[in-house]
C-alpha cells in the first residue's frame, strides 16, 4: 500500500489548516487520473479530480480551525503541529508496512520524518521530501483533496458572513480589506481568523490606535 500526505492552508490568516492523506494499492492507479500538484490545476479541474479521487480511494482529512490552531501554537511551533496532524492521518488511514510519501513541512525533511515517526506505533516507511506534491502522484492526490476541502471551507465562511473574504492569505487585498472592515465594526477578530498571525495583530493594533485618536 502507498499513502500520500499533504496540507493546505499553512499560511493564511483566515480559515482552517487542512491535512489530507490518500491511500492506494498501486501508484499507477492514481497517476492515470492525471493528477498534479493542486496549485498547477484550475479550480474546476481540482473539483473534478477530487470527486474521482474520493470515489476511488480511501482518504482521510483533518481540519484544524483557527481557534484550535491558535491554542496549539501557545505551546507548539507550526511545524510541530503539522507533525502531529500528519501522524494522526497515518494512524487513521494506513495499515502496517505502508509506504508513506509526505510533502515535508520543515526545512529539514529528514527531521520532519523522524518527528512524525515518534507519533506512530505501527511500522510504515516514511519518505519525506520537499516538492513531493509535484513528484509523487499519490501526494498530488492528497494535495488536491486538502486544497479543495480548504477552498470549500472558505466558501462556507464567505456565505456565513455574506461578504467576500478573499483567499484568506495575508497577501490577498480582499482578505486584508475584509479583516480591517470587520475589526473596525466589531472591535475584535472574527472567529475564523488566526489571532496569532501578525496580520491579525497589525490590524487590531491599527484599529486600537485609530480609536484612541478619534477623541
Image: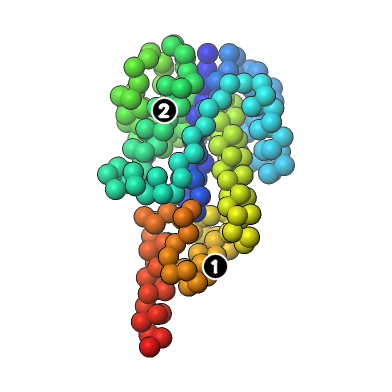
Q: Nearer the viewer, residue 180 or 31?
A: 180
| As drawn, 171 above or below 118 | below
Q: Quadrant of residue 165?
A: bottom right
Q: In the image, is 93 to the left or to the right of 29?
A: left
Q: Position of residue 93 (x, y in %)?
A: 49, 21
Residue 67 place in picture, x, y as percent: 41, 49
Q: CA distance from mark 1 to mark 2?
A: 35 Å
Res 141 quadrant in image: top right
Question: What is the crowding at mark 2: few (fewer than 14 residues within 10 Å), some, or many (at least 20)?
Answer: some
Asked if disc 1 and disc 2 are in contact, CB closer than 8 Å, the reply is: no
Residue in the image at 50% along x and 64% along y? 179
Q: Is residue 85 above or below residue 190?
A: above
Q: Nearer the viewer, residue 138 or 202?
A: 202
- Residue depicted at 53% across the width and 27% down the height: 60
Q: Is residue 135 visible?
A: no
Residue at the top extreme of this rendering: 97
Question: Among all residues in the image, which is located at the extreme bottom?
Answer: 215
Few, some or many residues within 10 Å of mark 1 (<14, 14–19, 20+):
some
- Give the image location of residue 133, x and y in percent: 54, 33
Residue 68 at least partly seen: yes
**Does dot 1 land on a helix, a strand or a loop?**
helix
Q: Which residue is mark 2?
A: 88
- The quarter of the image holding the C terminus is bottom left
Q: Is residue 25 left or right of residue 106?
A: right
Give the residue displayed 62% in from the left and 62% down from the top.
163
> Of the numbered discs in the image, which one, if any, rests on residue 177?
1
Query: 170 above or below 118?
Result: below
Amino acid at each position: 500500500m502507498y499513502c500520500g500526505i499533504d496540507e493546505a492552508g499553512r499560511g493564511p490568516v483566515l480559515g482552517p489548516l487542512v491535512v489530507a492523506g490518500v491511500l492506494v494499492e498501486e501508484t499507477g492507479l492514481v497517476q492515470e487520473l492525471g493528477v498534479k500538484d493542486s496549485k498547477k490545476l484550475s479550480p474546476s479541474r481540482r473539483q473534478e479530480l477530487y470527486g474521482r479521487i474520493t470515489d476511488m480511494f480511501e482518504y482521510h482529512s483533518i481540519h484544524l480551525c483557527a481557534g484550535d490552531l491558535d491554542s496549539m501554537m501557545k505551546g507548539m511551533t507550526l511545524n510541530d503541529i503539522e507533525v502531529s496532524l500528519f501522524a494522526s492521518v497515518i494512524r487513521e488511514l494506513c495499515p502496517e508496512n505502508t509506504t508513506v510519501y509526505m510533502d515535508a513541512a520543515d526545512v529539514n525533511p529528514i527531521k520532519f520524518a523522524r518527528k512524525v515517526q515518534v507519533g506512530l506505533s505501527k511500522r510504515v516507511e516514511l519518505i519525506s521530501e520537499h516538492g513531493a506534491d509535484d513528484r509523487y502522484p499519490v501526494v498530488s492526490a492528497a494535495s488536491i483533496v486538502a486544497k479543495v476541502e480548504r477552498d470549500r471551507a472558505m466558501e462556507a465562511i464567505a456565505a456565513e458572513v455574506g461578504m467576500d473574504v478573499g483567499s484568506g492569505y495575508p497577501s490577498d487585498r480582499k482578505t486584508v480589506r475584509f479583516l480591517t472592515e470587520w475589526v473596525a465594526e466589531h472591535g475584535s477578530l472574527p472567529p475564523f481568523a488566526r489571532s496569532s498571525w501578525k496580520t491579525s495583530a497589525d490590524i487590531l493594533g491599527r484599529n486600537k490606535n485609530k480609536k484612541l485618536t478619534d477623541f
